[in-house]
Image: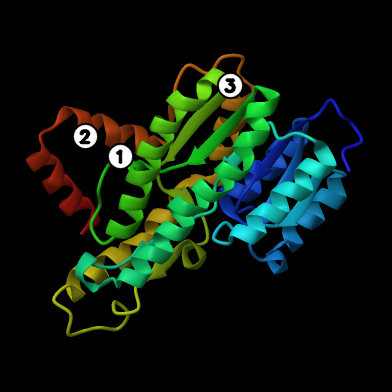
């Protein structure tokens, strides 16, 4: 229970690891009464330990963004305890890897169910609360892949492109109620390689595939990219800065040197030249 009613209330999805984990902790350490939500509470040991050690105003709550009832129960619990939600960070998501032709419709649907419909589901549950209190901030974790396409990640990239359009359109509608929308666009983030990616079922060990060589090169390159990526805390810091700013002027915020570099190149070269650069660096 929130002992300090003056504290702003933040809800973060996908908080068991990575960006969600660091964001939940950083917000709690900076005066937000934070609900770190996750699909699987078995993964809450690390964040629970830090909560107890630092005596943080942080609650760990089960929330599966793909399930209507789970979202409804979690948001109802938060509002019954706090009577408000000031910040929602839609972070839950994953990347699906595989050639477009070899990914099943079911795999595409699962990708969208988490990365797009999960955001819609949680945001629609929270919006009436923010609208009634005439304030709030919705932070959607997109990606540099929400602005640029990359090979072997058509499902993930298209889900992030969808999130970009969804966020930009929604922002027009809800600003009249004092609600802000912010898109965070990280580059490659240093995180657990195995937990961050799902490989398509028809992709694994399919040596007869027409895309086998391309796929193997892409997958082999992921590990070093993730190991050399920006730390998750960098994303959390940008989120904290934007939500505590008196008047954030932008809709979109890039995070990571690679993200800034890529966008600069993309904006200054032809489509043909950019494709060559992507093929050379990624494949």
> What is the secondary structure assignment of the residue under circle 3?
helix
Instruction: Locate the C terminus by quadrant.
Output: bottom left
Disc 1 and disc 2 in contact, CB within 8 angstroms: yes
Q: Earlier in the sequence, mark 1 or mark 2?
A: 1
Instruction: Locate the N terminus by quadrant.
Output: top right
Residue 188 at x, y = what percent?
Answer: 41, 48
Q: Is residue 31 above or below residue 120?
A: above
- Residue topped by disc 2: 266
Callout 3: few (<14), some (14-19), or many (20+) C-alpha neighbours within 10 Å? some
Q: Is residue 6 left or right of residue 105?
A: right
Q: Residues under labels 3 and 2: Cα distance?
A: 35 Å
The quadrant in which residue 26 appears is: top right
Callout 2: few (<14), some (14-19), or many (20+) C-alpha neighbours within 10 Å? some
Residue 225 at x, y = what percent?
Answer: 38, 54
Q: Residues under labels 1 and 2: Cα distance?
A: 10 Å
- Name the foreground residue: 108 vs 241: 108
> What is the secondary structure assignment of the residue under circle 2?
helix
> What is the secondary structure assignment of the residue under circle 1?
loop
Disc 1 and disc 3 in contact, CB within 8 angstroms: no
Q: Residue at x 27, y 64 (%)?
A: 218
Q: Is residue 45 above or below residue 35?
A: below
Q: Residues under labels 1 and 3: Cα distance?
A: 28 Å
The quadrant in which residue 68 appears is: bottom right
Residue 140 at x, y = what percent?
Answer: 50, 39
Residue 107 at x, y = what percent?
Answer: 37, 69
Instruction: Tell me, yes or no, if residue 54 can be seen here.
Output: yes
- Residue topped by disc 3: 177
- Between disc 1 and disc 2, the foreground one is 1
Q: Residue at x 54, y 60 (%)?
A: 66
- Between disc 3 and disc 2, the foreground one is 3
- Name the foreground residue: 17 vs 101: 101
- Residue topped by disc 1: 147
């Amino acid at each position: 229970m929130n002992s300090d009613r003056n504290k702003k209330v933040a809800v973060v999805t996908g908080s068991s690891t990575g960006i969600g984990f660091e964001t939940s902790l950083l917000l709690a350490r900076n005066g937000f009464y934070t609900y770190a939500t996750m699909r699987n509470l078995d993964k809450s040991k690390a964040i629970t330990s830090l909560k107890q050690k630092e005596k943080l105003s942080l609650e760990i709550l089960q929330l599966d963004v793909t399930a209507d009832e789970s979202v409804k129960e979690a948001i109802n619990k938060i509002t019954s305890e706090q009577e408000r939600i000031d910040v929602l960070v839609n972070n839950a998501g994953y990347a699906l890897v595989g050639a477009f032709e070899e990914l099943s419709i079911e795999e595409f649907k699962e990708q969208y169910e988490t990365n797009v419909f999960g955001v819609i589901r949680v945001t629609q549950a929270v919006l009436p609360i923010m609208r009634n209190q005439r304030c709030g901030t919705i932070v959607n974790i997109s990606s540099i892949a929400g602005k640029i396409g990359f090979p072997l990640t058509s499902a993930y990239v298209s889900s992030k492109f969808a999130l970009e359009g969804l966020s930009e359109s929604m922002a027009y509608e809800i600003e009249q109620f004092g609600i802000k929308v912010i898109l965070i666009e990280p580059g490659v983030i240093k995180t657990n390689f195995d937990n961050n990616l799902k490989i398509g079922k028809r992709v694994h060990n399919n040596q007869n595939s027409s895309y086998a060589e391309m796929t193997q090169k892409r997958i082999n390159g992921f590990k070093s990219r993730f190991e050399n990526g920006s730390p998750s805390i960098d994303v959390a810091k940008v989120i904290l800065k934007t939500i505590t700013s008196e008047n954030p002027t932008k809709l979109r915020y890039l995070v990571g040197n690679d993200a800034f570099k890529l966008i600069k190149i993309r904006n200054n070269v032809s489509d043909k030249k950019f494709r060559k650069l992507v093929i050379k660096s990624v494949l």
